Image (cartoon, grey):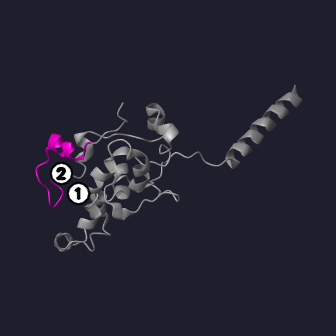
Amino acid sequence: MKRHLILALGLVVLGGLLMGMAPEAKVDHELVGSSKCKSCHKKIGNPYVLWQDSAHAKAYETLGTPEAKKIAADQGLGDPQKEEACLKCHVTRVFLGNPAVNAKGKYADTEGVGCEACHGAGSDYKKKKIMKDHDAAVANGMIREKTEEHCTQCHNSDSPTYKEFDMEKRWAEIDHPVTEKK
């Protein structure tokens, strides 16, 4: 009886040690960049082109304008292209809370507010096999945020350039197909 107890206890300790040596499970999704989305989604209405021509794609660029620099200076901030207070609405990475950037991806802050700002960091759902299964894509981090709460995290009166936000009108400007046409 005593030998069985010692054996069982030894197995529990060994199991704990082995689990402690196992690599951590990956729980955070990484950014891959909008250009990674383009390669597959050009077949479904080319939302990349719609995005590329949008104000979202130029959001980081606008922070380099004389107007943005003046607004930042008036608020006691430095370079708006480096200030967290500005980047949180002009850069996908900061908007999403600074997730890691996938080493094989093509993400850069200069893309502004990209696909992943609304669809979630794409490293774990970008594969075609996963994307073809909506539930699998969602389980791997894909979202489709069509809520006023999501948009008004930036489009609100805290913004120094705020203009009245009309959700339906603004959504129509960025809406795009999400599945292949049958």
Q: Is residue 6 above or below residue 174?
A: above
The residue located at (52%, 45%) in the rendering is 27
Dot 2 amino acid type:
Asn
Q: Which mark is residue 156?
A: 2
Q: Quadrant of the C terminus?
A: top left
Residue 55: numbered disc: 1
Percent position of residue 170, x then y: 18, 46
Residue in the picture at 74% in, 39% down: 15
Majority secondary structure of magenta residues: loop
The front one of 107 and 46 is 46
Query: Which is more toward the observer, 116 or 23?
Result: 116
Magenta stretch: includes residue 159? yes
7 or 89, nearer to the observer: 89
Residue sitting at x 16%, y 40%: 168
Q: Nearer the viewer, residue 131 or 159?
A: 131
> Mark 1 belongs to which amino acid?
Ala
Task: Residue 23: give x, y in percent of width and height.
Answer: 65, 49
Residue at x-position 21% and y-position 72%: 65
Query: In the rendered structure, which segment of residues is drawn in magenta?
Result: 156-175
Please determine whether, in this image, residue 26 is positioned above or below residue 6: below
Quadrant housing residue 134: top left
Horizontal placement of 16 versus 180: left or right? right
Q: Tell me the tag on residue 92.
A: none
Based on the picture, tell me whether residue 79 belongs to the magenta stretch: no
For marks 2 and 1, the one nearer the N-term is 1
